[in-house]
Each structure stands twice: as C-alpha cells, then as structure tokens.
C-alpha cells in the first residue's frame, strides 16, 4: 500500500499565513463570539469578582479560615487529590490493557470508560450511594468486615474516582497508541528486561500525559457536586465538600460566605489550569505532540 | 462532484491507511515487547474488576432499582405530573441551550481557526473557562448577577423580570456549563484543516455564505455532531449549576436531575431511579453514537485526548 499523499490543507496550515485573509466574516464571527462570551461567562464572573472585592482580602481570608469553611476546602482538595492519585494508577493499567491487549468485551469496556462524561452526575450519585451503602451490593459485602464506604469520606473518594477516571484514561490512551514499537525493541535488544523497558522507556513517555490527566481529574474533582452529595453523608468537618457548603451558605442567604468559598476554589482551580498549560507546553517540547 | 468533495476533505484516504495499521500493532507484538501471559491475565483482571465496580455496576443498579417495584410503578413514576413537567423542562432547556452553543461554537471556531489575531490563545482559555469552574460556583455567579440581592436584581424586579428561580436562570446556567463543548471540537478540527479549501472556493467565485455552507460545513459536520452530542448530554444532565438557580419549585422549575434528587430525598427510591433510568438511557445512546462517530469518522474529528 502506498502512503496517501498529504492533504494540501495540512501543508498550507503549516506555513505562516498571510496577514490579510481573503476569507470573509472575521468581524462578524469575532464580534459575535466576544459578545456571547461576555454575556454568558464574563458578566457572571464579574459579578462574582465584584462581590469578592467588596469583602476585601481580609474578608476573604477571615471566611477562609473559619473552621467549617477550612474543613470543607481541605476535604474537597485532599480527597480530590487522593482520588486523582488512585485514578492515575488504575487509569494507566486500564489504558494499557484496553490499548495493547485483545480480549472479549474489550471494545465494550473501552466505550464504557466515557460513561462518567455522559451519565448525569445526580444519577451517578444515587447509583453509587445505592451500591456502596451498608445494604447495597458492595456495601453489604464489606459490612461484616466493619468497613463502611458510603456516608464517609471514603464514599466521596469513590464518587471522585468515578468522575475522574476518563480524564486519565483518555489522556494516556493516545500516547500508548502512538508509542513506537521500535523503541521497545531497541530497549529489549540492548538487554533490558521487560520491567526495565516499562519503567525506564514507556513510563517516562507517559508521564506528561499522566500529569495532564491527573490535573484535569483533580480540577474536576474539586468542583464536583452532584455525584458526591448523595454518597458523602455531608457531615460538617468530616464529609462536607466545599461546593456543598456554598449551597448551604446560599440557602442561609449568606452571599458573602458563598462568594468567599467560591473565590478560594476558583483561585486554586486557576492555578491548576495554569499548571496544566505549563505541563502541556513542557511535554510538547520534550516528547512531541501529546 | 461528490467524489471530488470527499477526496478534498481528505478523510477517507487517511482512514484506509491508519485503520489496519493500528490494529496490526495490537495483535502481532513480538515477545520482547509484550508481557508474559500471567501478567497479561492479571492486568486484564484488574481492569475488568475495576471498570465493573466503578462503571458497569452503577449503570446496572439504575435499571434494577428502577424496576424493583414492577413495571407499573416504573411507568407510574414516569407519567406523574411532576415527572412529566420535569421531562418537559429538561427538553425545553436543552432545546434552547444546545442551539445557542452551536451558533457560538461555529462563530468562535470560524474567527479563531481561520484568522490570525492577537490575544487568540487568551480567548481560547476564556472559552475553556467554564470547564474549570465548579457547577455550583457557576450557579452562584448567576445568583450574584440576577438574584434578588444581586447586581441586576433591583432593575429586574422593577421591570417585573424573573431570571433566578425561573426558567431563564436554568437556561443561562446550562448554557454556561455546556459553553465550550461545540467550540473546542470545532476549533481543534478547523485549525487542523486550515483555510485552503475555503480560499479555493472563494477564488473560484463562491460567495462567503455558500463557501461556508458548501465547503466548511461538510468538512466539519462530524465534529459538529460530536460536540453537539456531548453538549446535549451535559445540558440534559446538569445538576449542580441548575440546582443553585432553580429554587426547586415542583412542576415549575424542576429539571429531570433535580426531580431525581427530590424523589431520592423523599425515600421514594424506585421512582427516583425510574426517572434516573431515562437519563441513563440518554447517556447510553450518547455513548453509542459517540463510539460510532469515533470508529466510523475518526479522521473527521480532531485528533486529541477527549475530555469532559
């Protein structure tokens, strides 16, 4: 088979485009984009920032260190971190198995990985709560051992694993597909055992994608609400997540409190987004397109 | 004409090339670049158990619980007035939010992918922003803007307009959380495709509008459908953002996910799962269509890790 000739469009886009384009509609499309973006995203964001600036830094700080607020933020961030870490381990295994091995049901499982993207979070929440509750399918199995998952912080981790899994798998999978077999062969013919090839050749190549997937899953987990609240138990200081505390504050008409928690969460989320961009830039330089 | 057009898009030629190539790589790996059968079996076992526990079981229990009190109870839960109004509202909200985001996605992708201008990457970051904002925070923003004590609250009240605790608020919150889906698919693909096709059409005398309709749109239709699928699934299933702005007024501002929550909190588990099963069905249909698009038209979709 002869390789197909490259599409002309691809080679064109690689060239620096001339500054003045003959394509019409720039003003209209950009104008529409900016107006729509402003109404849907920037204006609400501005309302939040305005409310926060009314509180001032000291106000934000004093709300942030209130014991219940601090506990909720800590719960959200540490559990999201834990879930993302667990997902990295199992996500790599899942991505590897689904990409490299053939077994009955592989395609079905591969498609199922995207389920958390498609299943509404409230549905996931009640389903996980039903499974892991003390009288549920899994909950009843482990209850005799004295273990409890639903209505404890562990339940939150379960929900966040569910929510975060596709981020890791779908970020790592294309990298595994693109791994050159030659590199593994070279490593093996130079005397490396399979384990050495895995740990010294393959894992480093996966690392940038893993970090990206980790950050995405972590960021999503911090803000997750629907799938968590049903399984969490929602006890203040123990299993109360930050988004739930925002809802609680809103129900008390405590807009300042809700705003401050949101600002704390946003600040950390922006930091993660920034980190993702740095990681992606670095991984592209180091390993090509990831 | 139609043959020339497909050749132009370039997709079929590539799919013939890359398809079998990748499948061959999976099947015939030499022993030095594969794992032992034992390790293989263990890894496959771990994967199957892990995915069953976290993905298959939740899906299974939705349908088991939904029918736990029989088909009659299941049907009764779905046709109750509150459930019907929730289904109606969910469909209405999606019918407004999804087209709104399609229009935006097309406009944004055209401006960003076909032209060079300063601040482009900042604009892309802003478009992706809703994905990194917690849905609850998104809802809070709209409450602070349009709520009774919000920035525009007094003005809205003076003009007798209701946004928060009413349908417009639910629509706005849904548009916010589904904002990037269509745009990011189209931007990624149209940047790959460049401007060559459109320039050719224009230089052959086509008008701007017919260039867009007859050249650009056919080039991006599968990616557009892909983005719409994801956007719609999220629009119908959104919980956090909608929960904050809706006020949970039964029969008025309850969407399907909110109705599920209310039933569940009333310990009406079978009914909650019955309504949830409709949403799960929607998720399954979305997954099937998505997988179909990915296997059938992979080269007409932007090649990148998929998120959200």
Image (cartoon, coloured by chain):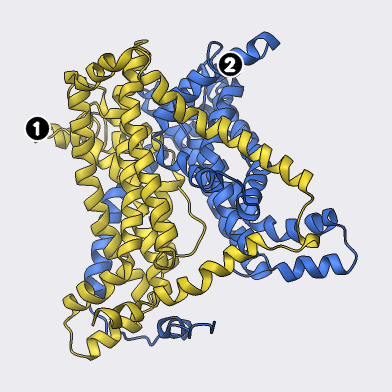
Chain colours: A blue, B yellow
Q: x and y percent of residue B277 in the render?
A: 34, 28
The quadrant holding residue B274 is top left
Q: Residue at x 53, y 45 (%)?
A: A166
* Image height of B94 relative to A75, above or below: below
Q: Residue B160 carries which label?
A: 1
Q: Nearer the viewer, residue A93 or A73?
A: A93
Q: Nearer the viewer, residue A183 or A208?
A: A183
Q: x and y percent of residue B77 in the render?
A: 25, 18
Picture mark count: 2
Task: Let me know if residue B62 appears in the view.
Answer: yes
Disc 2 and disc 1: Cα gap in Å?
A: 51 Å
* Image height of B76 relative to A41, above or below: above
* Image height of A255 relative to A267, above or below: above
Q: x and y percent of residue A283 in the render?
A: 64, 63
Mark 2 near mark 1, Cβ–Cβ under 8 Å? no
The quadrant holding residue B146 is top left
* Image height of B263 relative to B199, above or below: above
Residue beneath label 2, please? A139
Q: x and y percent of residue A150 in the render?
A: 55, 18
- Of tags 2 and 1, the one toward the viewer is 2
Q: Which mark is residue A11?
A: none
Near mark 1 (Cα within 10 A), the count class, few <14, some 14-19 or many ≥20, is few
Task: Let me know if residue A85 appears in the view.
Answer: no
Give the farthest residue toward the bottom: B204
Near mark 2 (Cα within 10 A), the count class, few <14, some 14-19 or many ≥20, is some
Q: Which residue is drawn at 39% across and 54% down?
A: B292
Q: Which of A96 and B134 is in front in this view?
A: A96
Give the farthest residue toward the left: B159
Q: Which residue is drawn at 58% across and 65% down?
A: B22
Protein chain holding label 1: B
């Amino acid at each position: 088979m002869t390789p197909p000739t490259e599409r002309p469009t691809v080679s064109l886009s690689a060239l620096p485009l001339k500054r003045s384009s003959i394509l019409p509609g720039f003003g209209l499309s950009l104008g529409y984009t900016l107006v729509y973006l402003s109404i849907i995203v920037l204006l609400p964001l501005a309302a939040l920032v305005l409310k926060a600036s009314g509180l001032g830094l000291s106000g934000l700080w004093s709300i942030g260190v209130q014991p219940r607020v601090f506990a909720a933020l800590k719960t959200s961030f540490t559990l999201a971190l834990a879930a993302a870490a667990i997902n990295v381990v199992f996500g790599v295994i899942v991505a590897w198995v689904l990409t490299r091995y053939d077994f009955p049901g592989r395609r079905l499982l591969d498609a199922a990985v995207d389920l958390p993207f498609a299943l509404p979070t409230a549905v996931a929440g009640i389903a996980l709560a039903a499974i892991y509750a003390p009288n549920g399918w899994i909950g009843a199995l482990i209850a005799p051992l004295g273990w409890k998952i639903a209505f404890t912080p562990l339940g939150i981790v379960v929900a966040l694993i569910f929510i975060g899994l596709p981020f890791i798998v779908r970020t790592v999978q294309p990298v595994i597909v693109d791994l050159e077999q030659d590199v593994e062969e070279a490593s093996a013919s130079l005397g490396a055992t399979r384990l050495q090839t895995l740990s010294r050749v393959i894992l480093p190549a996966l690392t940038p994608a893993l970090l990206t997937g980790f950050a995405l899953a972590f960021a999503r987990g911090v803000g997750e609400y629907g799938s968590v609240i049903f399984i969490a138990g929602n006890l203040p200081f123990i299993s109360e997540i930050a988004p739930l505390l925002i809802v609680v504050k809103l129900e008390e008409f405590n807009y300042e409190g809700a705003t401050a928690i949101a600002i704390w969460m946003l600040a950390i989320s922006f930091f993660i987004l920034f980190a993702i961009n740095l990681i992606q830039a670095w991984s592209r330089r180091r390993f090509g397109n990831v | 004409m139609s043959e020339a057009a497909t050749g132009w898009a370039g997709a079929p030629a590539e799919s013939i090339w890359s398809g079998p190539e990748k499948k061959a790589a999976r099947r015939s790996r030499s022993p030095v670049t594969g794992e032992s059968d034992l390790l293989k079996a263990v890894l496959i076992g771990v994967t199957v158990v892990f995915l069953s526990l976290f993905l298959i079981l939740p899906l299974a229990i939705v349908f088991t619980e939904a029918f736990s009190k029989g088909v009659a109870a299941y049907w009764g839960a779905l046709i109750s007035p509150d459930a019907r109004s929730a289904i109606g509202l969910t469909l209405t909200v999606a019918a407004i939010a999804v087209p709104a985001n399609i229009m935006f996605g097309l406009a944004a992708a055209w401006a960003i992918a076909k032209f060079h201008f300063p601040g482009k990457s900042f604009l892309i970051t802003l478009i992706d922003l809703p994905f990194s904002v917690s849905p609850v925070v998104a809802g809070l923003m709209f409450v602070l803007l349009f709520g009774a004590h919000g920035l525009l609250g007094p003005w809205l009240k003076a003009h007798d307009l209701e946004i928060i605790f009413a349908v417009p608020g639910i629509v706005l919150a849904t548009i916010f959380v589904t904002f990037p889906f269509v745009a990011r698919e189209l931007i990624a693909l149209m940047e790959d495709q460049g401007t060559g096709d459109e320039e050719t059409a224009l230089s052959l005398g086509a008008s701007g509008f017919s260039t867009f309709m007859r050249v650009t749109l056919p080039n991006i239709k599968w990616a557009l459908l892909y983005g719409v699928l994801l956007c719609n699934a999220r629009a119908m299933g959104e919980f956090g953002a909608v929960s904050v702005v809706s006020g949970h007024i039964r029969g008025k501002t309850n969407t399907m996910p909110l109705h599920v929550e209310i039933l569940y909190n009333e310990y009406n588990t079978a009914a909650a799962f019955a309504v949830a099963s409709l949403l799960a069905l929607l998720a399954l249909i979305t997954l099937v269509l998505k997988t179909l698009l990915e296997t059938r038209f992979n080269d007409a979709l932007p090649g990148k890790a998929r998120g959200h």
